[in-house]
Image (cartoon, rainbow, N blue to C red):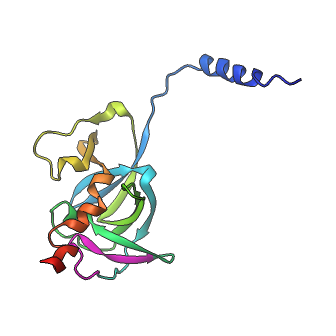
Amino acid sequence: MTDITAPTESRQVANRARPVTERPVHQYLSFILHGRRYALDGLCVREIIQYQRTTKVPMANRCVHGVINLRGAVVPVIDLGLRFNQAKTQIDRRTCIIIVEVAQPDAPQILGILVDAVSEVLEVAPTEMNPVPAFGNPIRSDFIHAMVHREDDFIILLTIENALAVAEIAALPDGNKALSA
């Protein structure tokens, strides 16, 4: 008869013997948008692609830059500059589209976000995260998860589910509601 509890007990003993000196870190993809550094959770990033021409969507909200064909799937591309009520993102040779999977109430949504340039992958420990200031933010505070200080600059960690809430974008005044006016 085989004792199936022995391996589990030995794993538990081994885990207890291991010192807990490692701090949990989380990876964020950082990017530049209008001269400011932002980052989003690395787990939601599917891929980064070079900017490609998009197809405009009639009567879509102005922050919807258009749609692209990504291996047979139609993917909406959001201009984060316009979504953040800033200037339209200028297209140049470093402009890229970050393909993200965003959790939504009904089902995950695949979206592209248009950014000036991708910077690097950051490893951030929870102790490095600063709370969102009550005022002076360049974007809505519900779009911000935390702020991280790096290299004499603050990087804004985004709450991508809020920043790219599909239902909210579709319901904005200059969006698809134009027919009912």
Residue drawn at point x = 19 percent, y = 60 percent: 84
Residue drawn at point x = 11 percent, y = 77 percent: 181
Q: Nearer the viewer, residue 71 or 81?
A: 71
Relative vertical location of residue 128 with respect to residue 59 in this rendering, above or below: above
Which residues lie in the magenta part? Answer: 57-69
Instruction: Tell me which corner region of the image, top left, top right, bottom left or bottom right, holds residue 58.
Output: bottom left
Instruction: Tell me which corner region of the image, top left, top right, bottom left or bottom right, holds residue 111.
Output: bottom left
Relative vertical location of residue 116 with respect to residue 36 in this rendering, above or below: below
> Is residue 94 in sight in this rendering?
no
Q: Nearer the viewer, residue 93 or 137?
A: 137
Residue drawn at point x = 15 percent, y = 52 percent: 138
Q: Residue furthest right?
A: 1
Q: Nearer the viewer, residue 109 or 95?
A: 109
Dividing the image into 4 quarters, which one contains the N terminus? Answer: top right
Residue 154, percent from left and from top = 24, 44
Residue 102, percent from left and from top = 38, 57
Instruction: Tell me which corner region of the image, top left, top right, bottom left or bottom right, holds residue 19.
Output: top right
Residue drawn at point x = 40 percent, y = 62 percent: 109
As for residue 109 lying within the magenta part, the answer is no
Determine whether, in the image, residue 105 is placed left or right of residue 22: left
Determine whether, in the image, residue 179 is placed left or right of residue 66: left
Residue 76, percent from left and from top = 35, 71
